[in-house]
Image (spheres, coloured by chain):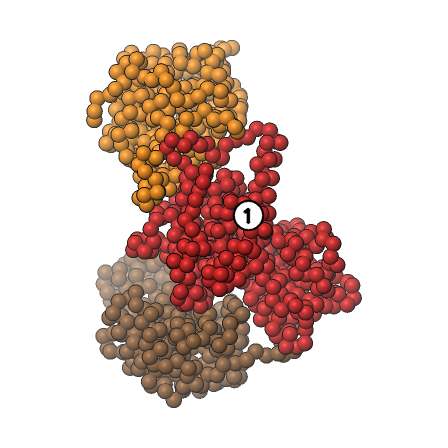
């Protein structure tokens, strides 16, 4: 085991290296590119045994990933944003093949307007595809989640591909200390992939991904995918425990922080949640009973775990780094549906949209969200969903608009 | 926690600076976070990188809201992006500049309430034939200012980060870094780890309700021509092309045709004129002029300042 | 190159690999080409199919293949082939499968995919010198959706999206030329109605490594509007009239493998198909017919 400074991108590449993947189909896109460059370099140097192929699009890349997995190899690939959407048809398609592999998505806001910095609309656009989704908050978690993802994907009760998500810039280009496990220990945790009957070989006739006619037959296959996805919830803890036994780091389906005596909490996904932890620390110094709940798995959606974690909580500020046009925050919506069908005394939810396109969420904004949530609980009046956006930001926007709308010359 | 920000230009090695200092902290047993802020910027454009280091796990992320130390590799940046360089600085923050000007001048001019220091003359840090490795120099100065990084650790960090560039480059970097580290011994420990203000000390964010505006306004469309002229990209320039009109043959076309930036116009008498407000200093014109009528000189704050024009 | 084993029709296998029982239309000229090709390639193959008529070859739980098959989507069958080839190579290199477990990878794709949506993926597969076979069954329209115009539709043919008096206004794209511009290991045009020519070409391609590209003109009773019994006859007429030149590309050269000795007028081919009926009645469209003939004449004047 060594501990060194790695970017989220390098941590992802290390995850693939330690998983001893056979195949990496690739296509460059910011802010993911460093991952495939790193892997390509290792393969060139003979430090990684396998094959690296640059495809001509993400659509083809995901096809090649799925077909190589369907041939019985361990596959890793990576993309971001527009690339994930360009490959969207194939995300759904290859998930239906039930051939497990791991795709790293480095979150980046979607066009239009096109941008480089992160939010979660790209990854959440894939939430109904059949891929499991693990959302990371630190570079260590990126590496560890790749290993966990292969175990989950290849588990007999799951057999679905997994997207591991990390935020562009905030993780992808940020170095943090990361423990790189020893390969021998990884081999014990993650043995070689046994594709069982998902493979192509001479002498074993097999037709994969075939058509089906008739809604009832179709429903069977699709619902089986759903059940397999849900199975993740029951196998996650034992795989995570096995991971902890080997590497000393324990991951839950949720990360909870300072929740033991909490009356209020933040709920959010991804790397910005570490900022929420920082805000929790400062608020606790000021006498608040407040914590954080961060779902690590978004698919399957950990509804029961969230309901349990929020039992006894008075008010929750749900911070969505995404925006479903015409609806609002996706996490808020899904959390509300989970709580609505639970028997517990549901906490009051306040919905915030923040961090779109990499827009920062400041400490004072966390504090204000906490105050508003407490006020909502005290008065019983829930504020409307809010975009975190300041007067000064609109003023800056106005300056740009003056240029964009004024004749020049 | 230590919160340190490096400002420089694309190509000056600010990412390297943050990585060397980050690794040095890490080798001294700190938890570390370092990153470069990427954007659409290119060589010569303002760029920054940052390092956080703490004995505790770091929960902050992204750009540093309140830096303890800001190191500026190129004082011309203070003309381009003074608000960016000074962003979040408090009276307790320290500004360390690579500048020929006196720190006092900058302190007054920027109306900055914290302490301002200057690097020693950086040209003296290198052998005459060597390239100046300003990023590494800035990292070494930062290592000295925090006072918790030994010379041995600094050396190791430089070796770790630059190993891939080969021995000779590593040696040059080491020599320059150790010189500045030694010369600045008196500044050891000037920067102390800062704690975080309490909740009550933060201002209330001035949130607004986002107004609805129709698509004629709110679509990402520019309803005007050539608005990019508003960007004074001349401030990216580190080298300045200068036309010697005595040698100019008024061919009227070569420099103006090849300039990718459309920064050379031809006046009514057939003489080319450089638009210094936008010239990025690529010196392609100098290379192409058949009569060698264009020369280059080092860009200075004074000449740049006169070219600045209207910033957004 | 060694002599062909296919000297006469008798040399073709009568023990066919592709099973019957599929949902493909009766009299399909595309299926005819697939079947003959499959006999030569053998069952140690994996077909990678793109969206099109042949999607329906395998409908759960029925497959006609003795070997394997993977259904992808319309734009990306060559990428699917890449993934499988790469995976098999890795498995071979790492000793996890034996050479006798290896498979030939075959893309099976219609003209809608090959001439259009998958052209980028096909081009890239050739750029990467992928070792695979590619069979485009070209029925000159989006057949599986009811025969709308595709980039492979011939001039003047009536389709579901060009049902007016002049038919399709465009001209069939020269996919063979686009493919050969990539300098693949091998490329050929074929047709099911000329099984010996087809067999010899597939046989030749099997000795080569790299992209081996085939376009089979696929007479389509459903989309071209003719009686299914005439599929072979129409196919032969396509060759005899010279509208479907049989050729191959190898080592940078194009050779016509079955140039019609005396070309018969293209009308003989056109008038058998309902999609061209408007050229003959209610009155003869001499101008269009002459143009179609002139283009064929021009092709052969250049070719020979």
Q: Chain C takes which shade in the image?
A: orange
Q: Position of residue C41 (x, y in %)?
A: 34, 26
| Location of mark 1 (residue) | A126
Horizontal side of A232 relative to C296 (left or right) equals: right
The residue lying at 38 percent from left, 31 percent from top is A203
Identify the chain drawn in brown: B
Is A347 above or below relative to C22?
A: below
The residue lying at 61 percent from left, 35 percent from top is A219
Q: Position of residue A171 (x, y in %)?
A: 48, 62
Is A303 above or below relative to B16?
A: above
Residue C47 visible in rendering? no
Q: Position of residue A241 (x, y in %)?
A: 53, 58
In depth, the one of B141 and A124 nearer the eye is A124
Q: Position of residue C244 (x, y in %)?
A: 35, 20
Is A173 above or below relative to A325?
A: below
The residue lying at 44 percent from left, 42 percent from top is A195
Horizontal side of A44 relative to A12 (left or right) equals: left
């Amino acid at each position: 085991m060594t501990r060194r400074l790695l970017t989220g991108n390098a941590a992802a590449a290390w995850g693939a290296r330690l998983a001893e993947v056979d195949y990496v189909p690739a296509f460059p896109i910011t802010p993911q590119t460093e991952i495939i460059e790193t892997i390509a370099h290792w393969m060139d140097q003979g430090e990684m045994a396998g094959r690296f192929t640059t495809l001509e699009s993400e659509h083809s890349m995901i096809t090649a990933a799925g077909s190589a997995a369907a041939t019985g190899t361990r596959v890793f690939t990576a993309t971001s944003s527009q690339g994930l959407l360009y490959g969207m048809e194939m995300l759904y398609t290859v998930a239906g093949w039930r051939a497990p592999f791991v795709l790293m998505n480095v979150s980046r806001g979607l066009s239009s307007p096109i941008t480089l910095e992160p939010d979660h609309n790209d990854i959440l656009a894939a939430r109904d595809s059949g891929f499991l989704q693990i959302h990371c908050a630190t570079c260590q978690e990126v590496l560890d989640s790749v290993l966990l993802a292969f175990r989950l994907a290849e588990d007999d009760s799951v057999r679905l591909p997994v997207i591991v998500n990390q935020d562009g810039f905030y993780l992808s280009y940020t170095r943090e200390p990361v423990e790189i496990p020893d390969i021998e220990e990884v081999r014990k945790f993650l043995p070689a992939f046994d594709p069982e009957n998902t493979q192509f070989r001479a002498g074993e006739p097999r037709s994969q991904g075939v058509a089906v006619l008739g809604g009832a037959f179709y429903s069977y296959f699709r619902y089986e995918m759903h059940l397999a996805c849900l199975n993740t919830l029951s196998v996650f803890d034992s795989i995570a425990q096995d991971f902890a036994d080997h590497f000393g780091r324990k991951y839950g389906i949720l990360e909870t922080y300072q929740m033991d005596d909490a009356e209020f909490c933040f709920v959010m996904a991804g790397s910005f949640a570490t900022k929420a932890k920082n805000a929790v620390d400062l608020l606790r110094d000021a006498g608040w009973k407040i914590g954080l709940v961060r779902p690590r798995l978004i698919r399957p959606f950990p509804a029961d775990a969230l309901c349990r974690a929020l039992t006894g909580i008075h008010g929750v500020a749900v911070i969505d780094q995404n925006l479903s046009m015409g609806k609002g925050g996706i996490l808020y919506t899904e959390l509300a549906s989970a709580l609505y069908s639970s028997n517990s005394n549901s906490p009051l939810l306040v919905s915030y949209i923040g961090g779109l396109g990499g827009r920062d969420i400041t400490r004072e904004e966390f504090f204000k969200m906490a105050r508003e949530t407490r006020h909502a609980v005290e008065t019983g009046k829930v504020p409307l969903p809010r975009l975190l956006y300041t007067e000064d930001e609109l003023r800056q926007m106005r300056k740009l608009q003056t240029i964009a709308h004024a004749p020049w010359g | 926690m230590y919160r340190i920000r490096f400002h420089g230009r694309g190509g000056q090695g600010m990412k390297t600076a943050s990585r060397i200092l980050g690794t040095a902290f890490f080798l001294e047993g700190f938890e570390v976070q370092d990153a470069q802020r990427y954007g659409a910027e290119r060589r010569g454009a303002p760029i920054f990188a940052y390092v956080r280091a703490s004995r505790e796990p770091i929960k902050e992320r992204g750009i540093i809201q309140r830096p303890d130390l800001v190191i500026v590799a190129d004082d011309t940046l203070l003309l381009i992006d003074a608000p960016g360089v000074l962003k979040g600085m408090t009276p307790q923050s320290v500004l360390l500049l690579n500048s020929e000007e006196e720190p006092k001048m900058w302190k007054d001019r920027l109306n900055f309430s914290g302490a301002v220091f200057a690097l020693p003359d950086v040209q003296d840090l290198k052998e005459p034939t060597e390239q100046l490795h300003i990023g590494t120099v800035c990292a070494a100065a930062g290592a000295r200012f925090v006072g918790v990084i030994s010379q041995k650790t600094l050396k190791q960090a430089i070796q770790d980060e630059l190993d891939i560039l080969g021995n000779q480059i590593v040696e040059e970097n080491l020599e320059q870094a150790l010189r500045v580290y030694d010369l600045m011994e008196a500044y050891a420990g000037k920067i102390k780890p800062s704690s975080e203000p309490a909740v009550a000390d933060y201002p209330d964010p001035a949130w607004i309700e986002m107004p609805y505006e129709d698509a004629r306004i709110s679509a990402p469309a520019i309803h005007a021509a050539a608005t990019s002229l508003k960007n004074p990209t001349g401030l990216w320039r580190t080298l300045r092309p200068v036309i010697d009109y005595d040698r100019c043959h008024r061919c009227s076309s070569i420099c103006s045709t090849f300039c990718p930036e459309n920064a050379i116009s031809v006046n009514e008498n057939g003489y080319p004129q450089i638009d210094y407000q936008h010239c990025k200093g690529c010196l392609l014109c100098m290379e192409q002029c058949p009569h060698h009528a264009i020369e280059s000189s080092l860009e200075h704050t004074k000449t740049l300042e006169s070219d600045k024009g209207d910033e957004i | 190159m060694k002599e062909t084993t296919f000297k006469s029709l008798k040399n073709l296998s009568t023990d066919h690999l592709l099973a019957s029982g599929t949902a493909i239309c009766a009299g399909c000229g595309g299926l005819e080409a697939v079947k003959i090709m499959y006999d030569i390639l053998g069952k140690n193959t994996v077909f990678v199919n793109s969206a099109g008529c042949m999607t329906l070859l395998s409908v759960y739980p029925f497959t006609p293949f003795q070997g394997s098959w993977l259904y992808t989507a319309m734009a990306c069958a060559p990428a699917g082939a890449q993934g499988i080839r790469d995976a098999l190579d890795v498995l071979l290199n790492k000793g996890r499968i034996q050479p006798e477990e290896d498979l030939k990878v075959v893309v099976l794709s219609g003209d809608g995919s090959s001439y259009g949506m998958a052209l980028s993926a096909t081009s890239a597969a050739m750029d990467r010198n992928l070792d695979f076979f590619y069979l485009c069954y070209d029925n000159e329209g989006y057949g599986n959706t009811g025969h709308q115009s595709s980039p492979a539709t011939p001039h003047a043919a009536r389709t579901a999206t060009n049902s007016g008096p002049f038919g399709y206004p465009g001209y069939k794209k020269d996919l063979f030329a686009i493919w050969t511009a990539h300098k693949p290991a091998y490329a050929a045009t074929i047709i099911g109605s000329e099984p010996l020519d087809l067999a010899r070409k597939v046989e030749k391609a099997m000795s080569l490594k790299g992209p081996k590209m085939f376009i089979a003109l696929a007479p389509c009773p459903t989309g071209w509007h003719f009686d299914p019994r005439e599929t072979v006859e129409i196919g032969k007429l396509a060759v005899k009239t010279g509208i479907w030149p049989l050729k191959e590309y190898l080592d940078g050269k194009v050779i016509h493998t079955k140039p019609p000795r005396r070309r018969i007028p293209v009308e003989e081919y056109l008038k058998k198909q309902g999609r061209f009926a408007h050229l003959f009645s209610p009155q003869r469209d001499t101008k269009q017919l002459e143009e179609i003939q002139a283009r064929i004449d021009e092709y052969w004047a250049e070719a020979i």
